[in-house]
Image: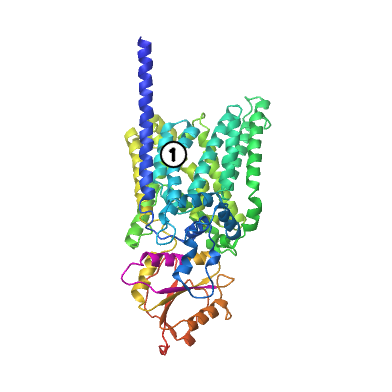
Amino acid sequence: MKFKTAVKTDHNQLFKKSQFQLLLLLLWLVIGCILRFTQLTDKSPWTDEFVTMVFSLGNSFKTVPLDSAIALDALMQPLQPNNSAGIGDVVNVLFAEDHHPPLYFVLAHLWMQLFPPQGGLISLWGARSLPALFGVASIIGVYFLGIAAFRSRRIGQIAAAIMAVSPYGIFLAQEARHYTLGILWIIASLCCLVIAAQNIQQRKTIPIWLVFAWVIINSLGISTHYFFVITLCAEAIVLIVLAWWNKAHQSDISVEKTNIFTLEWRRIYVVAAGTFAGGLVWLLVWQNTYKSEMTQWVESGNRHFLQWINPIFQSIGTWITMICLLPVEAPSLTVVIASGVAMLIFFLWALPILYRGLKTQLQQQSTIGIRVLGIFVLGAIALFFIISYGLGFDITRGARYNFVYFPAVIVLVGASLAVSWEKISTHNSARELNFPSSNLSITQGKKAVAMIWLIGLLSAVTVVSNLGYRKYYRPDILVPIIQQTSSVPVLIATTHNTIVQTGEIMGIGWEIKQIANSQKQINAQFLLAHQNQNRCEGKECRASDILKETLNELPQPIDLWLMNFHAPVDLKAQNCFADPSSFPPVYGYDYKLYHCRSNTKLPAN
């Protein structure tokens, strides 16, 4: 009877613990969901988001006329839902005009059909809500990755809590892009990796279901973003190091057990072959697009001193923002300086805590998860530098590309903080790690974890408020300037080289649409003057001639707003003179105003 009572008590305690774990995970999900969906549409969409929305609709940028003045509706036509477009149209337009694989765009095409148009255009909330949902799902993902790698629910919970408030994670989740879906595939692939590594360490056969699941996950990851290949290469580095480690420590293990042709290793080769076959379908597409005009911005070209050191500082900046980002992009210089100083103090305090935790985890010989994820992150970072320095493509310029190892970083942070929460509490631990024991009480350890999480929460609010990881373009600031300055019809002109410039002007058009019901509307036309090179410095620039011809055809008076116009401008013959006013700078737009008036004398030089 006592035995039955004890069993029943243990069962009740286990049930209560499971309930608590579930409720705690639900709390992180709620917090993460609130942060990712708060002010989801307050920030103006930018070029890359327009690319996602247009291609997900099955539309083309080529329908926007070039080299002539066009109305607002003609500029925004690619953002109008097309009921006749299907999945085939999405895939075809991607292959013709873009350089990304189609999986996310197909899913977005189906998802956005659930949301009615707004003002005749695609719903921005609908476009951004899908990656936001995937971002929320990644909280669950890192929880299970923490359990898979460390067999610890506490590590899983802390990782989920950090992911919920990660400023970098929220930055990716609030954009209409495919990175959060890629993160889910990375988490799933890493789960397969750590399970396989555990089986190899224990000299057990890798389950056949894991082989098939791993191949499918990897294939889906490649079909979401080509940079998923970096994840696969980093996983290969982990397996190579693991094979070497087993070989180097085979003194107490039979040679047969460390042979790389045993059944468990042969199944790893099956995964590699299956993944290669699954990604082979994209090889031809990649060969045709990897030198696409859309990737020119990461090409290093002739390097000077800053281009040699930029990848280092750009990488460090991204690593920091995975857990902390205070308002360093606020309008007030005082706030920017204070935020920078606060972040420096925070990391000087937090880095020793994280270091102690990782060092303690490495001392646990039974835990292979810390080695697998640690080597994976270091391998991925090494690949970034090899690509940036060796191949001449500085991919560190795009903070978003670090999504390929971001989930592993979060789980490693969770594993480190779990040590502070539960272990760094004795004088013995302090002596072993050569740190003062006065800093290592249980209470202080838990306070440290809570403080790091609270800083993460403040950082999340920073991103949501557009004071950190702010949008690359700010037409929401520029359009009110145009509205307040121009009392006559306006022509907004730019030099066009790729769809990047189309997106820049679409951002302005989007904001003009948003103020359509205001008292002072903007009567605007747009000109995208195409030129083959991004900048034209010579006397014979086609874009300059097109601008002059267009102005000659338009009735005056008219205000000419040049936006990122990279060609010489001499408009004296068109009776246009530059406005002498000093306008505030606007992020993403180099702009200048010309007043064009018939029979108007130009001011003397």
- Provide residue 260's location: percent of width, then percent of height: 67, 32
Specify start and end residues of the magenta stretch as a single range.
505-529
Task: Specify whether residue 356 is in view.
Answer: no
Residue 9, magenta (yes or no): no
- Provide residue 288's location: percent of width, then percent of height: 65, 57
- The single residue placed furthest to the front in the displayed view is 84
Examine the rendered structure and indicate whether residue 496 appears above or below residue 178.
Answer: below
Residue under pointer 1: 140
Q: Residue at image x 64%, y 40%?
A: 274
Examine the rendered structure and indicate whether residue 525 appears above or below residue 103.
Answer: below
Quadrant of image for the C terminus = bottom left
Examine the rendered structure and indicate whether residue 437 appears above or below residue 11.
Answer: below
Q: In the depicted view, which residue is nearer to us: 421 or 408? A: 408
Amino acid type, mark 1: Ile
Examine the rendered structure and indicate whether residue 553 appears above or below residue 28.
Answer: below
Quadrant of image for the N terminus = top left
